[in-house]
Amino acid sequence: MASRVVIKIGGSLFFDDAGVNTDRVQKFAQFLKKTPEIQAIIVGGGRIARTYIQGARALGASETECDLLGIATSRINGQLLIRAIGDTTYPWVPKSVEEFAKARATGKLVVMGGLQPGQSTTSVAVIIAEFLHADLLVVLTDVDGIYDKDPHKFPDAKRFSSITVDQLQKVLQKGAGAKIAAAGEYQIFDPVSSEIVKRSQLSVHLLSGKELAQISHIIKDPAADIGTKITR
Ligand code: UTP
């Protein structure tokens, strides 16, 4: 049983074609309220980040400026979740690890977004999890694990039940090529996340954010064969 858990929610999970998926945001909020093991939540930028980044890039923005737009959108998405959870959360998204520490000292649940250019919100989640000595980081995305090839294109794609950070970097690099470190294009595990996982004792599990019951399952039994376990 994990007792100190950090969760990263991919921003894409908050949106559907009609806009904000308020039903899903509410379900996350209810789930987070009744799961005291979860100590911090990091929310990504999702489609709204990519919309702004693509627009800004077309207008000549640098990658750093694009990253800053991505960070701003992740904080806006975090604010949506704060609204949905209500009074048990710290009311605003901290902008640094120091601000996070102060927010956490209030005893409230803290929701974070991005921190600085050059990384994704998965890196923020890894940094916060390392800071808290979390015994589990759960990364929620819109797929149910890491596959050896794109499961949408290849019906014979196989899910890894466990993968090392180095193997994962290779799988992701194959799919992304030169785009591995462009704003809005960071893969689910970017280079900063990988390096911090390698130096820390952190246990990381990637799961589908569409099956909330799986999160409770992995908290109760971190060895369960669901999603993909990422090891050092
Ligand atoms: P993410 O790419 O982490 O969002 O952040 P996400 O929603 O988790 O992504 P998906 O949808 O699950 O794939 C959005 C963008 O914000 C910038 C990056 O450009 C990133 O692609 N960002 C985020 C930073 O530059 N620094 C951060 O600390 C976080």
Image (cartoon, grey):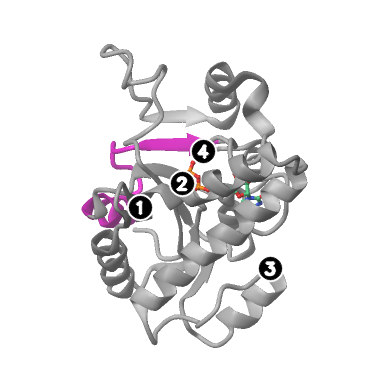
Identify the magenta region. 213-231
**Marks 4 and 3, the one that precedes in the sequence:** 3
Residue occupying image coordinates x 47% and y 28% = 163
Question: Mark 4 touching mark 2, by CB under 8 A?
Answer: no
Please name the residue shown 41% across and 42% down the image: 206
Image disc number at residue 15: 1
Closer to viewer: mark 4 or mark 2 = 2
Q: Mark 3 points at which residue?
A: 97
Amino acid bearing label 1: Phe
Secondary structure category for the residue under label 3: helix
Q: Is residue 124 left or right of residue 116?
A: left
Q: Position of residue 157 (x, y in %)?
A: 32, 16
The mark that comes first in sequence, 3 or 1, is 1
Q: What residue type is labelled 3?
A: Val
**Of the numbered discs in the image, which one, if any, rests on residue 47?**
2
Residue 72 in sight here: yes
Residue at image mark 4: 188
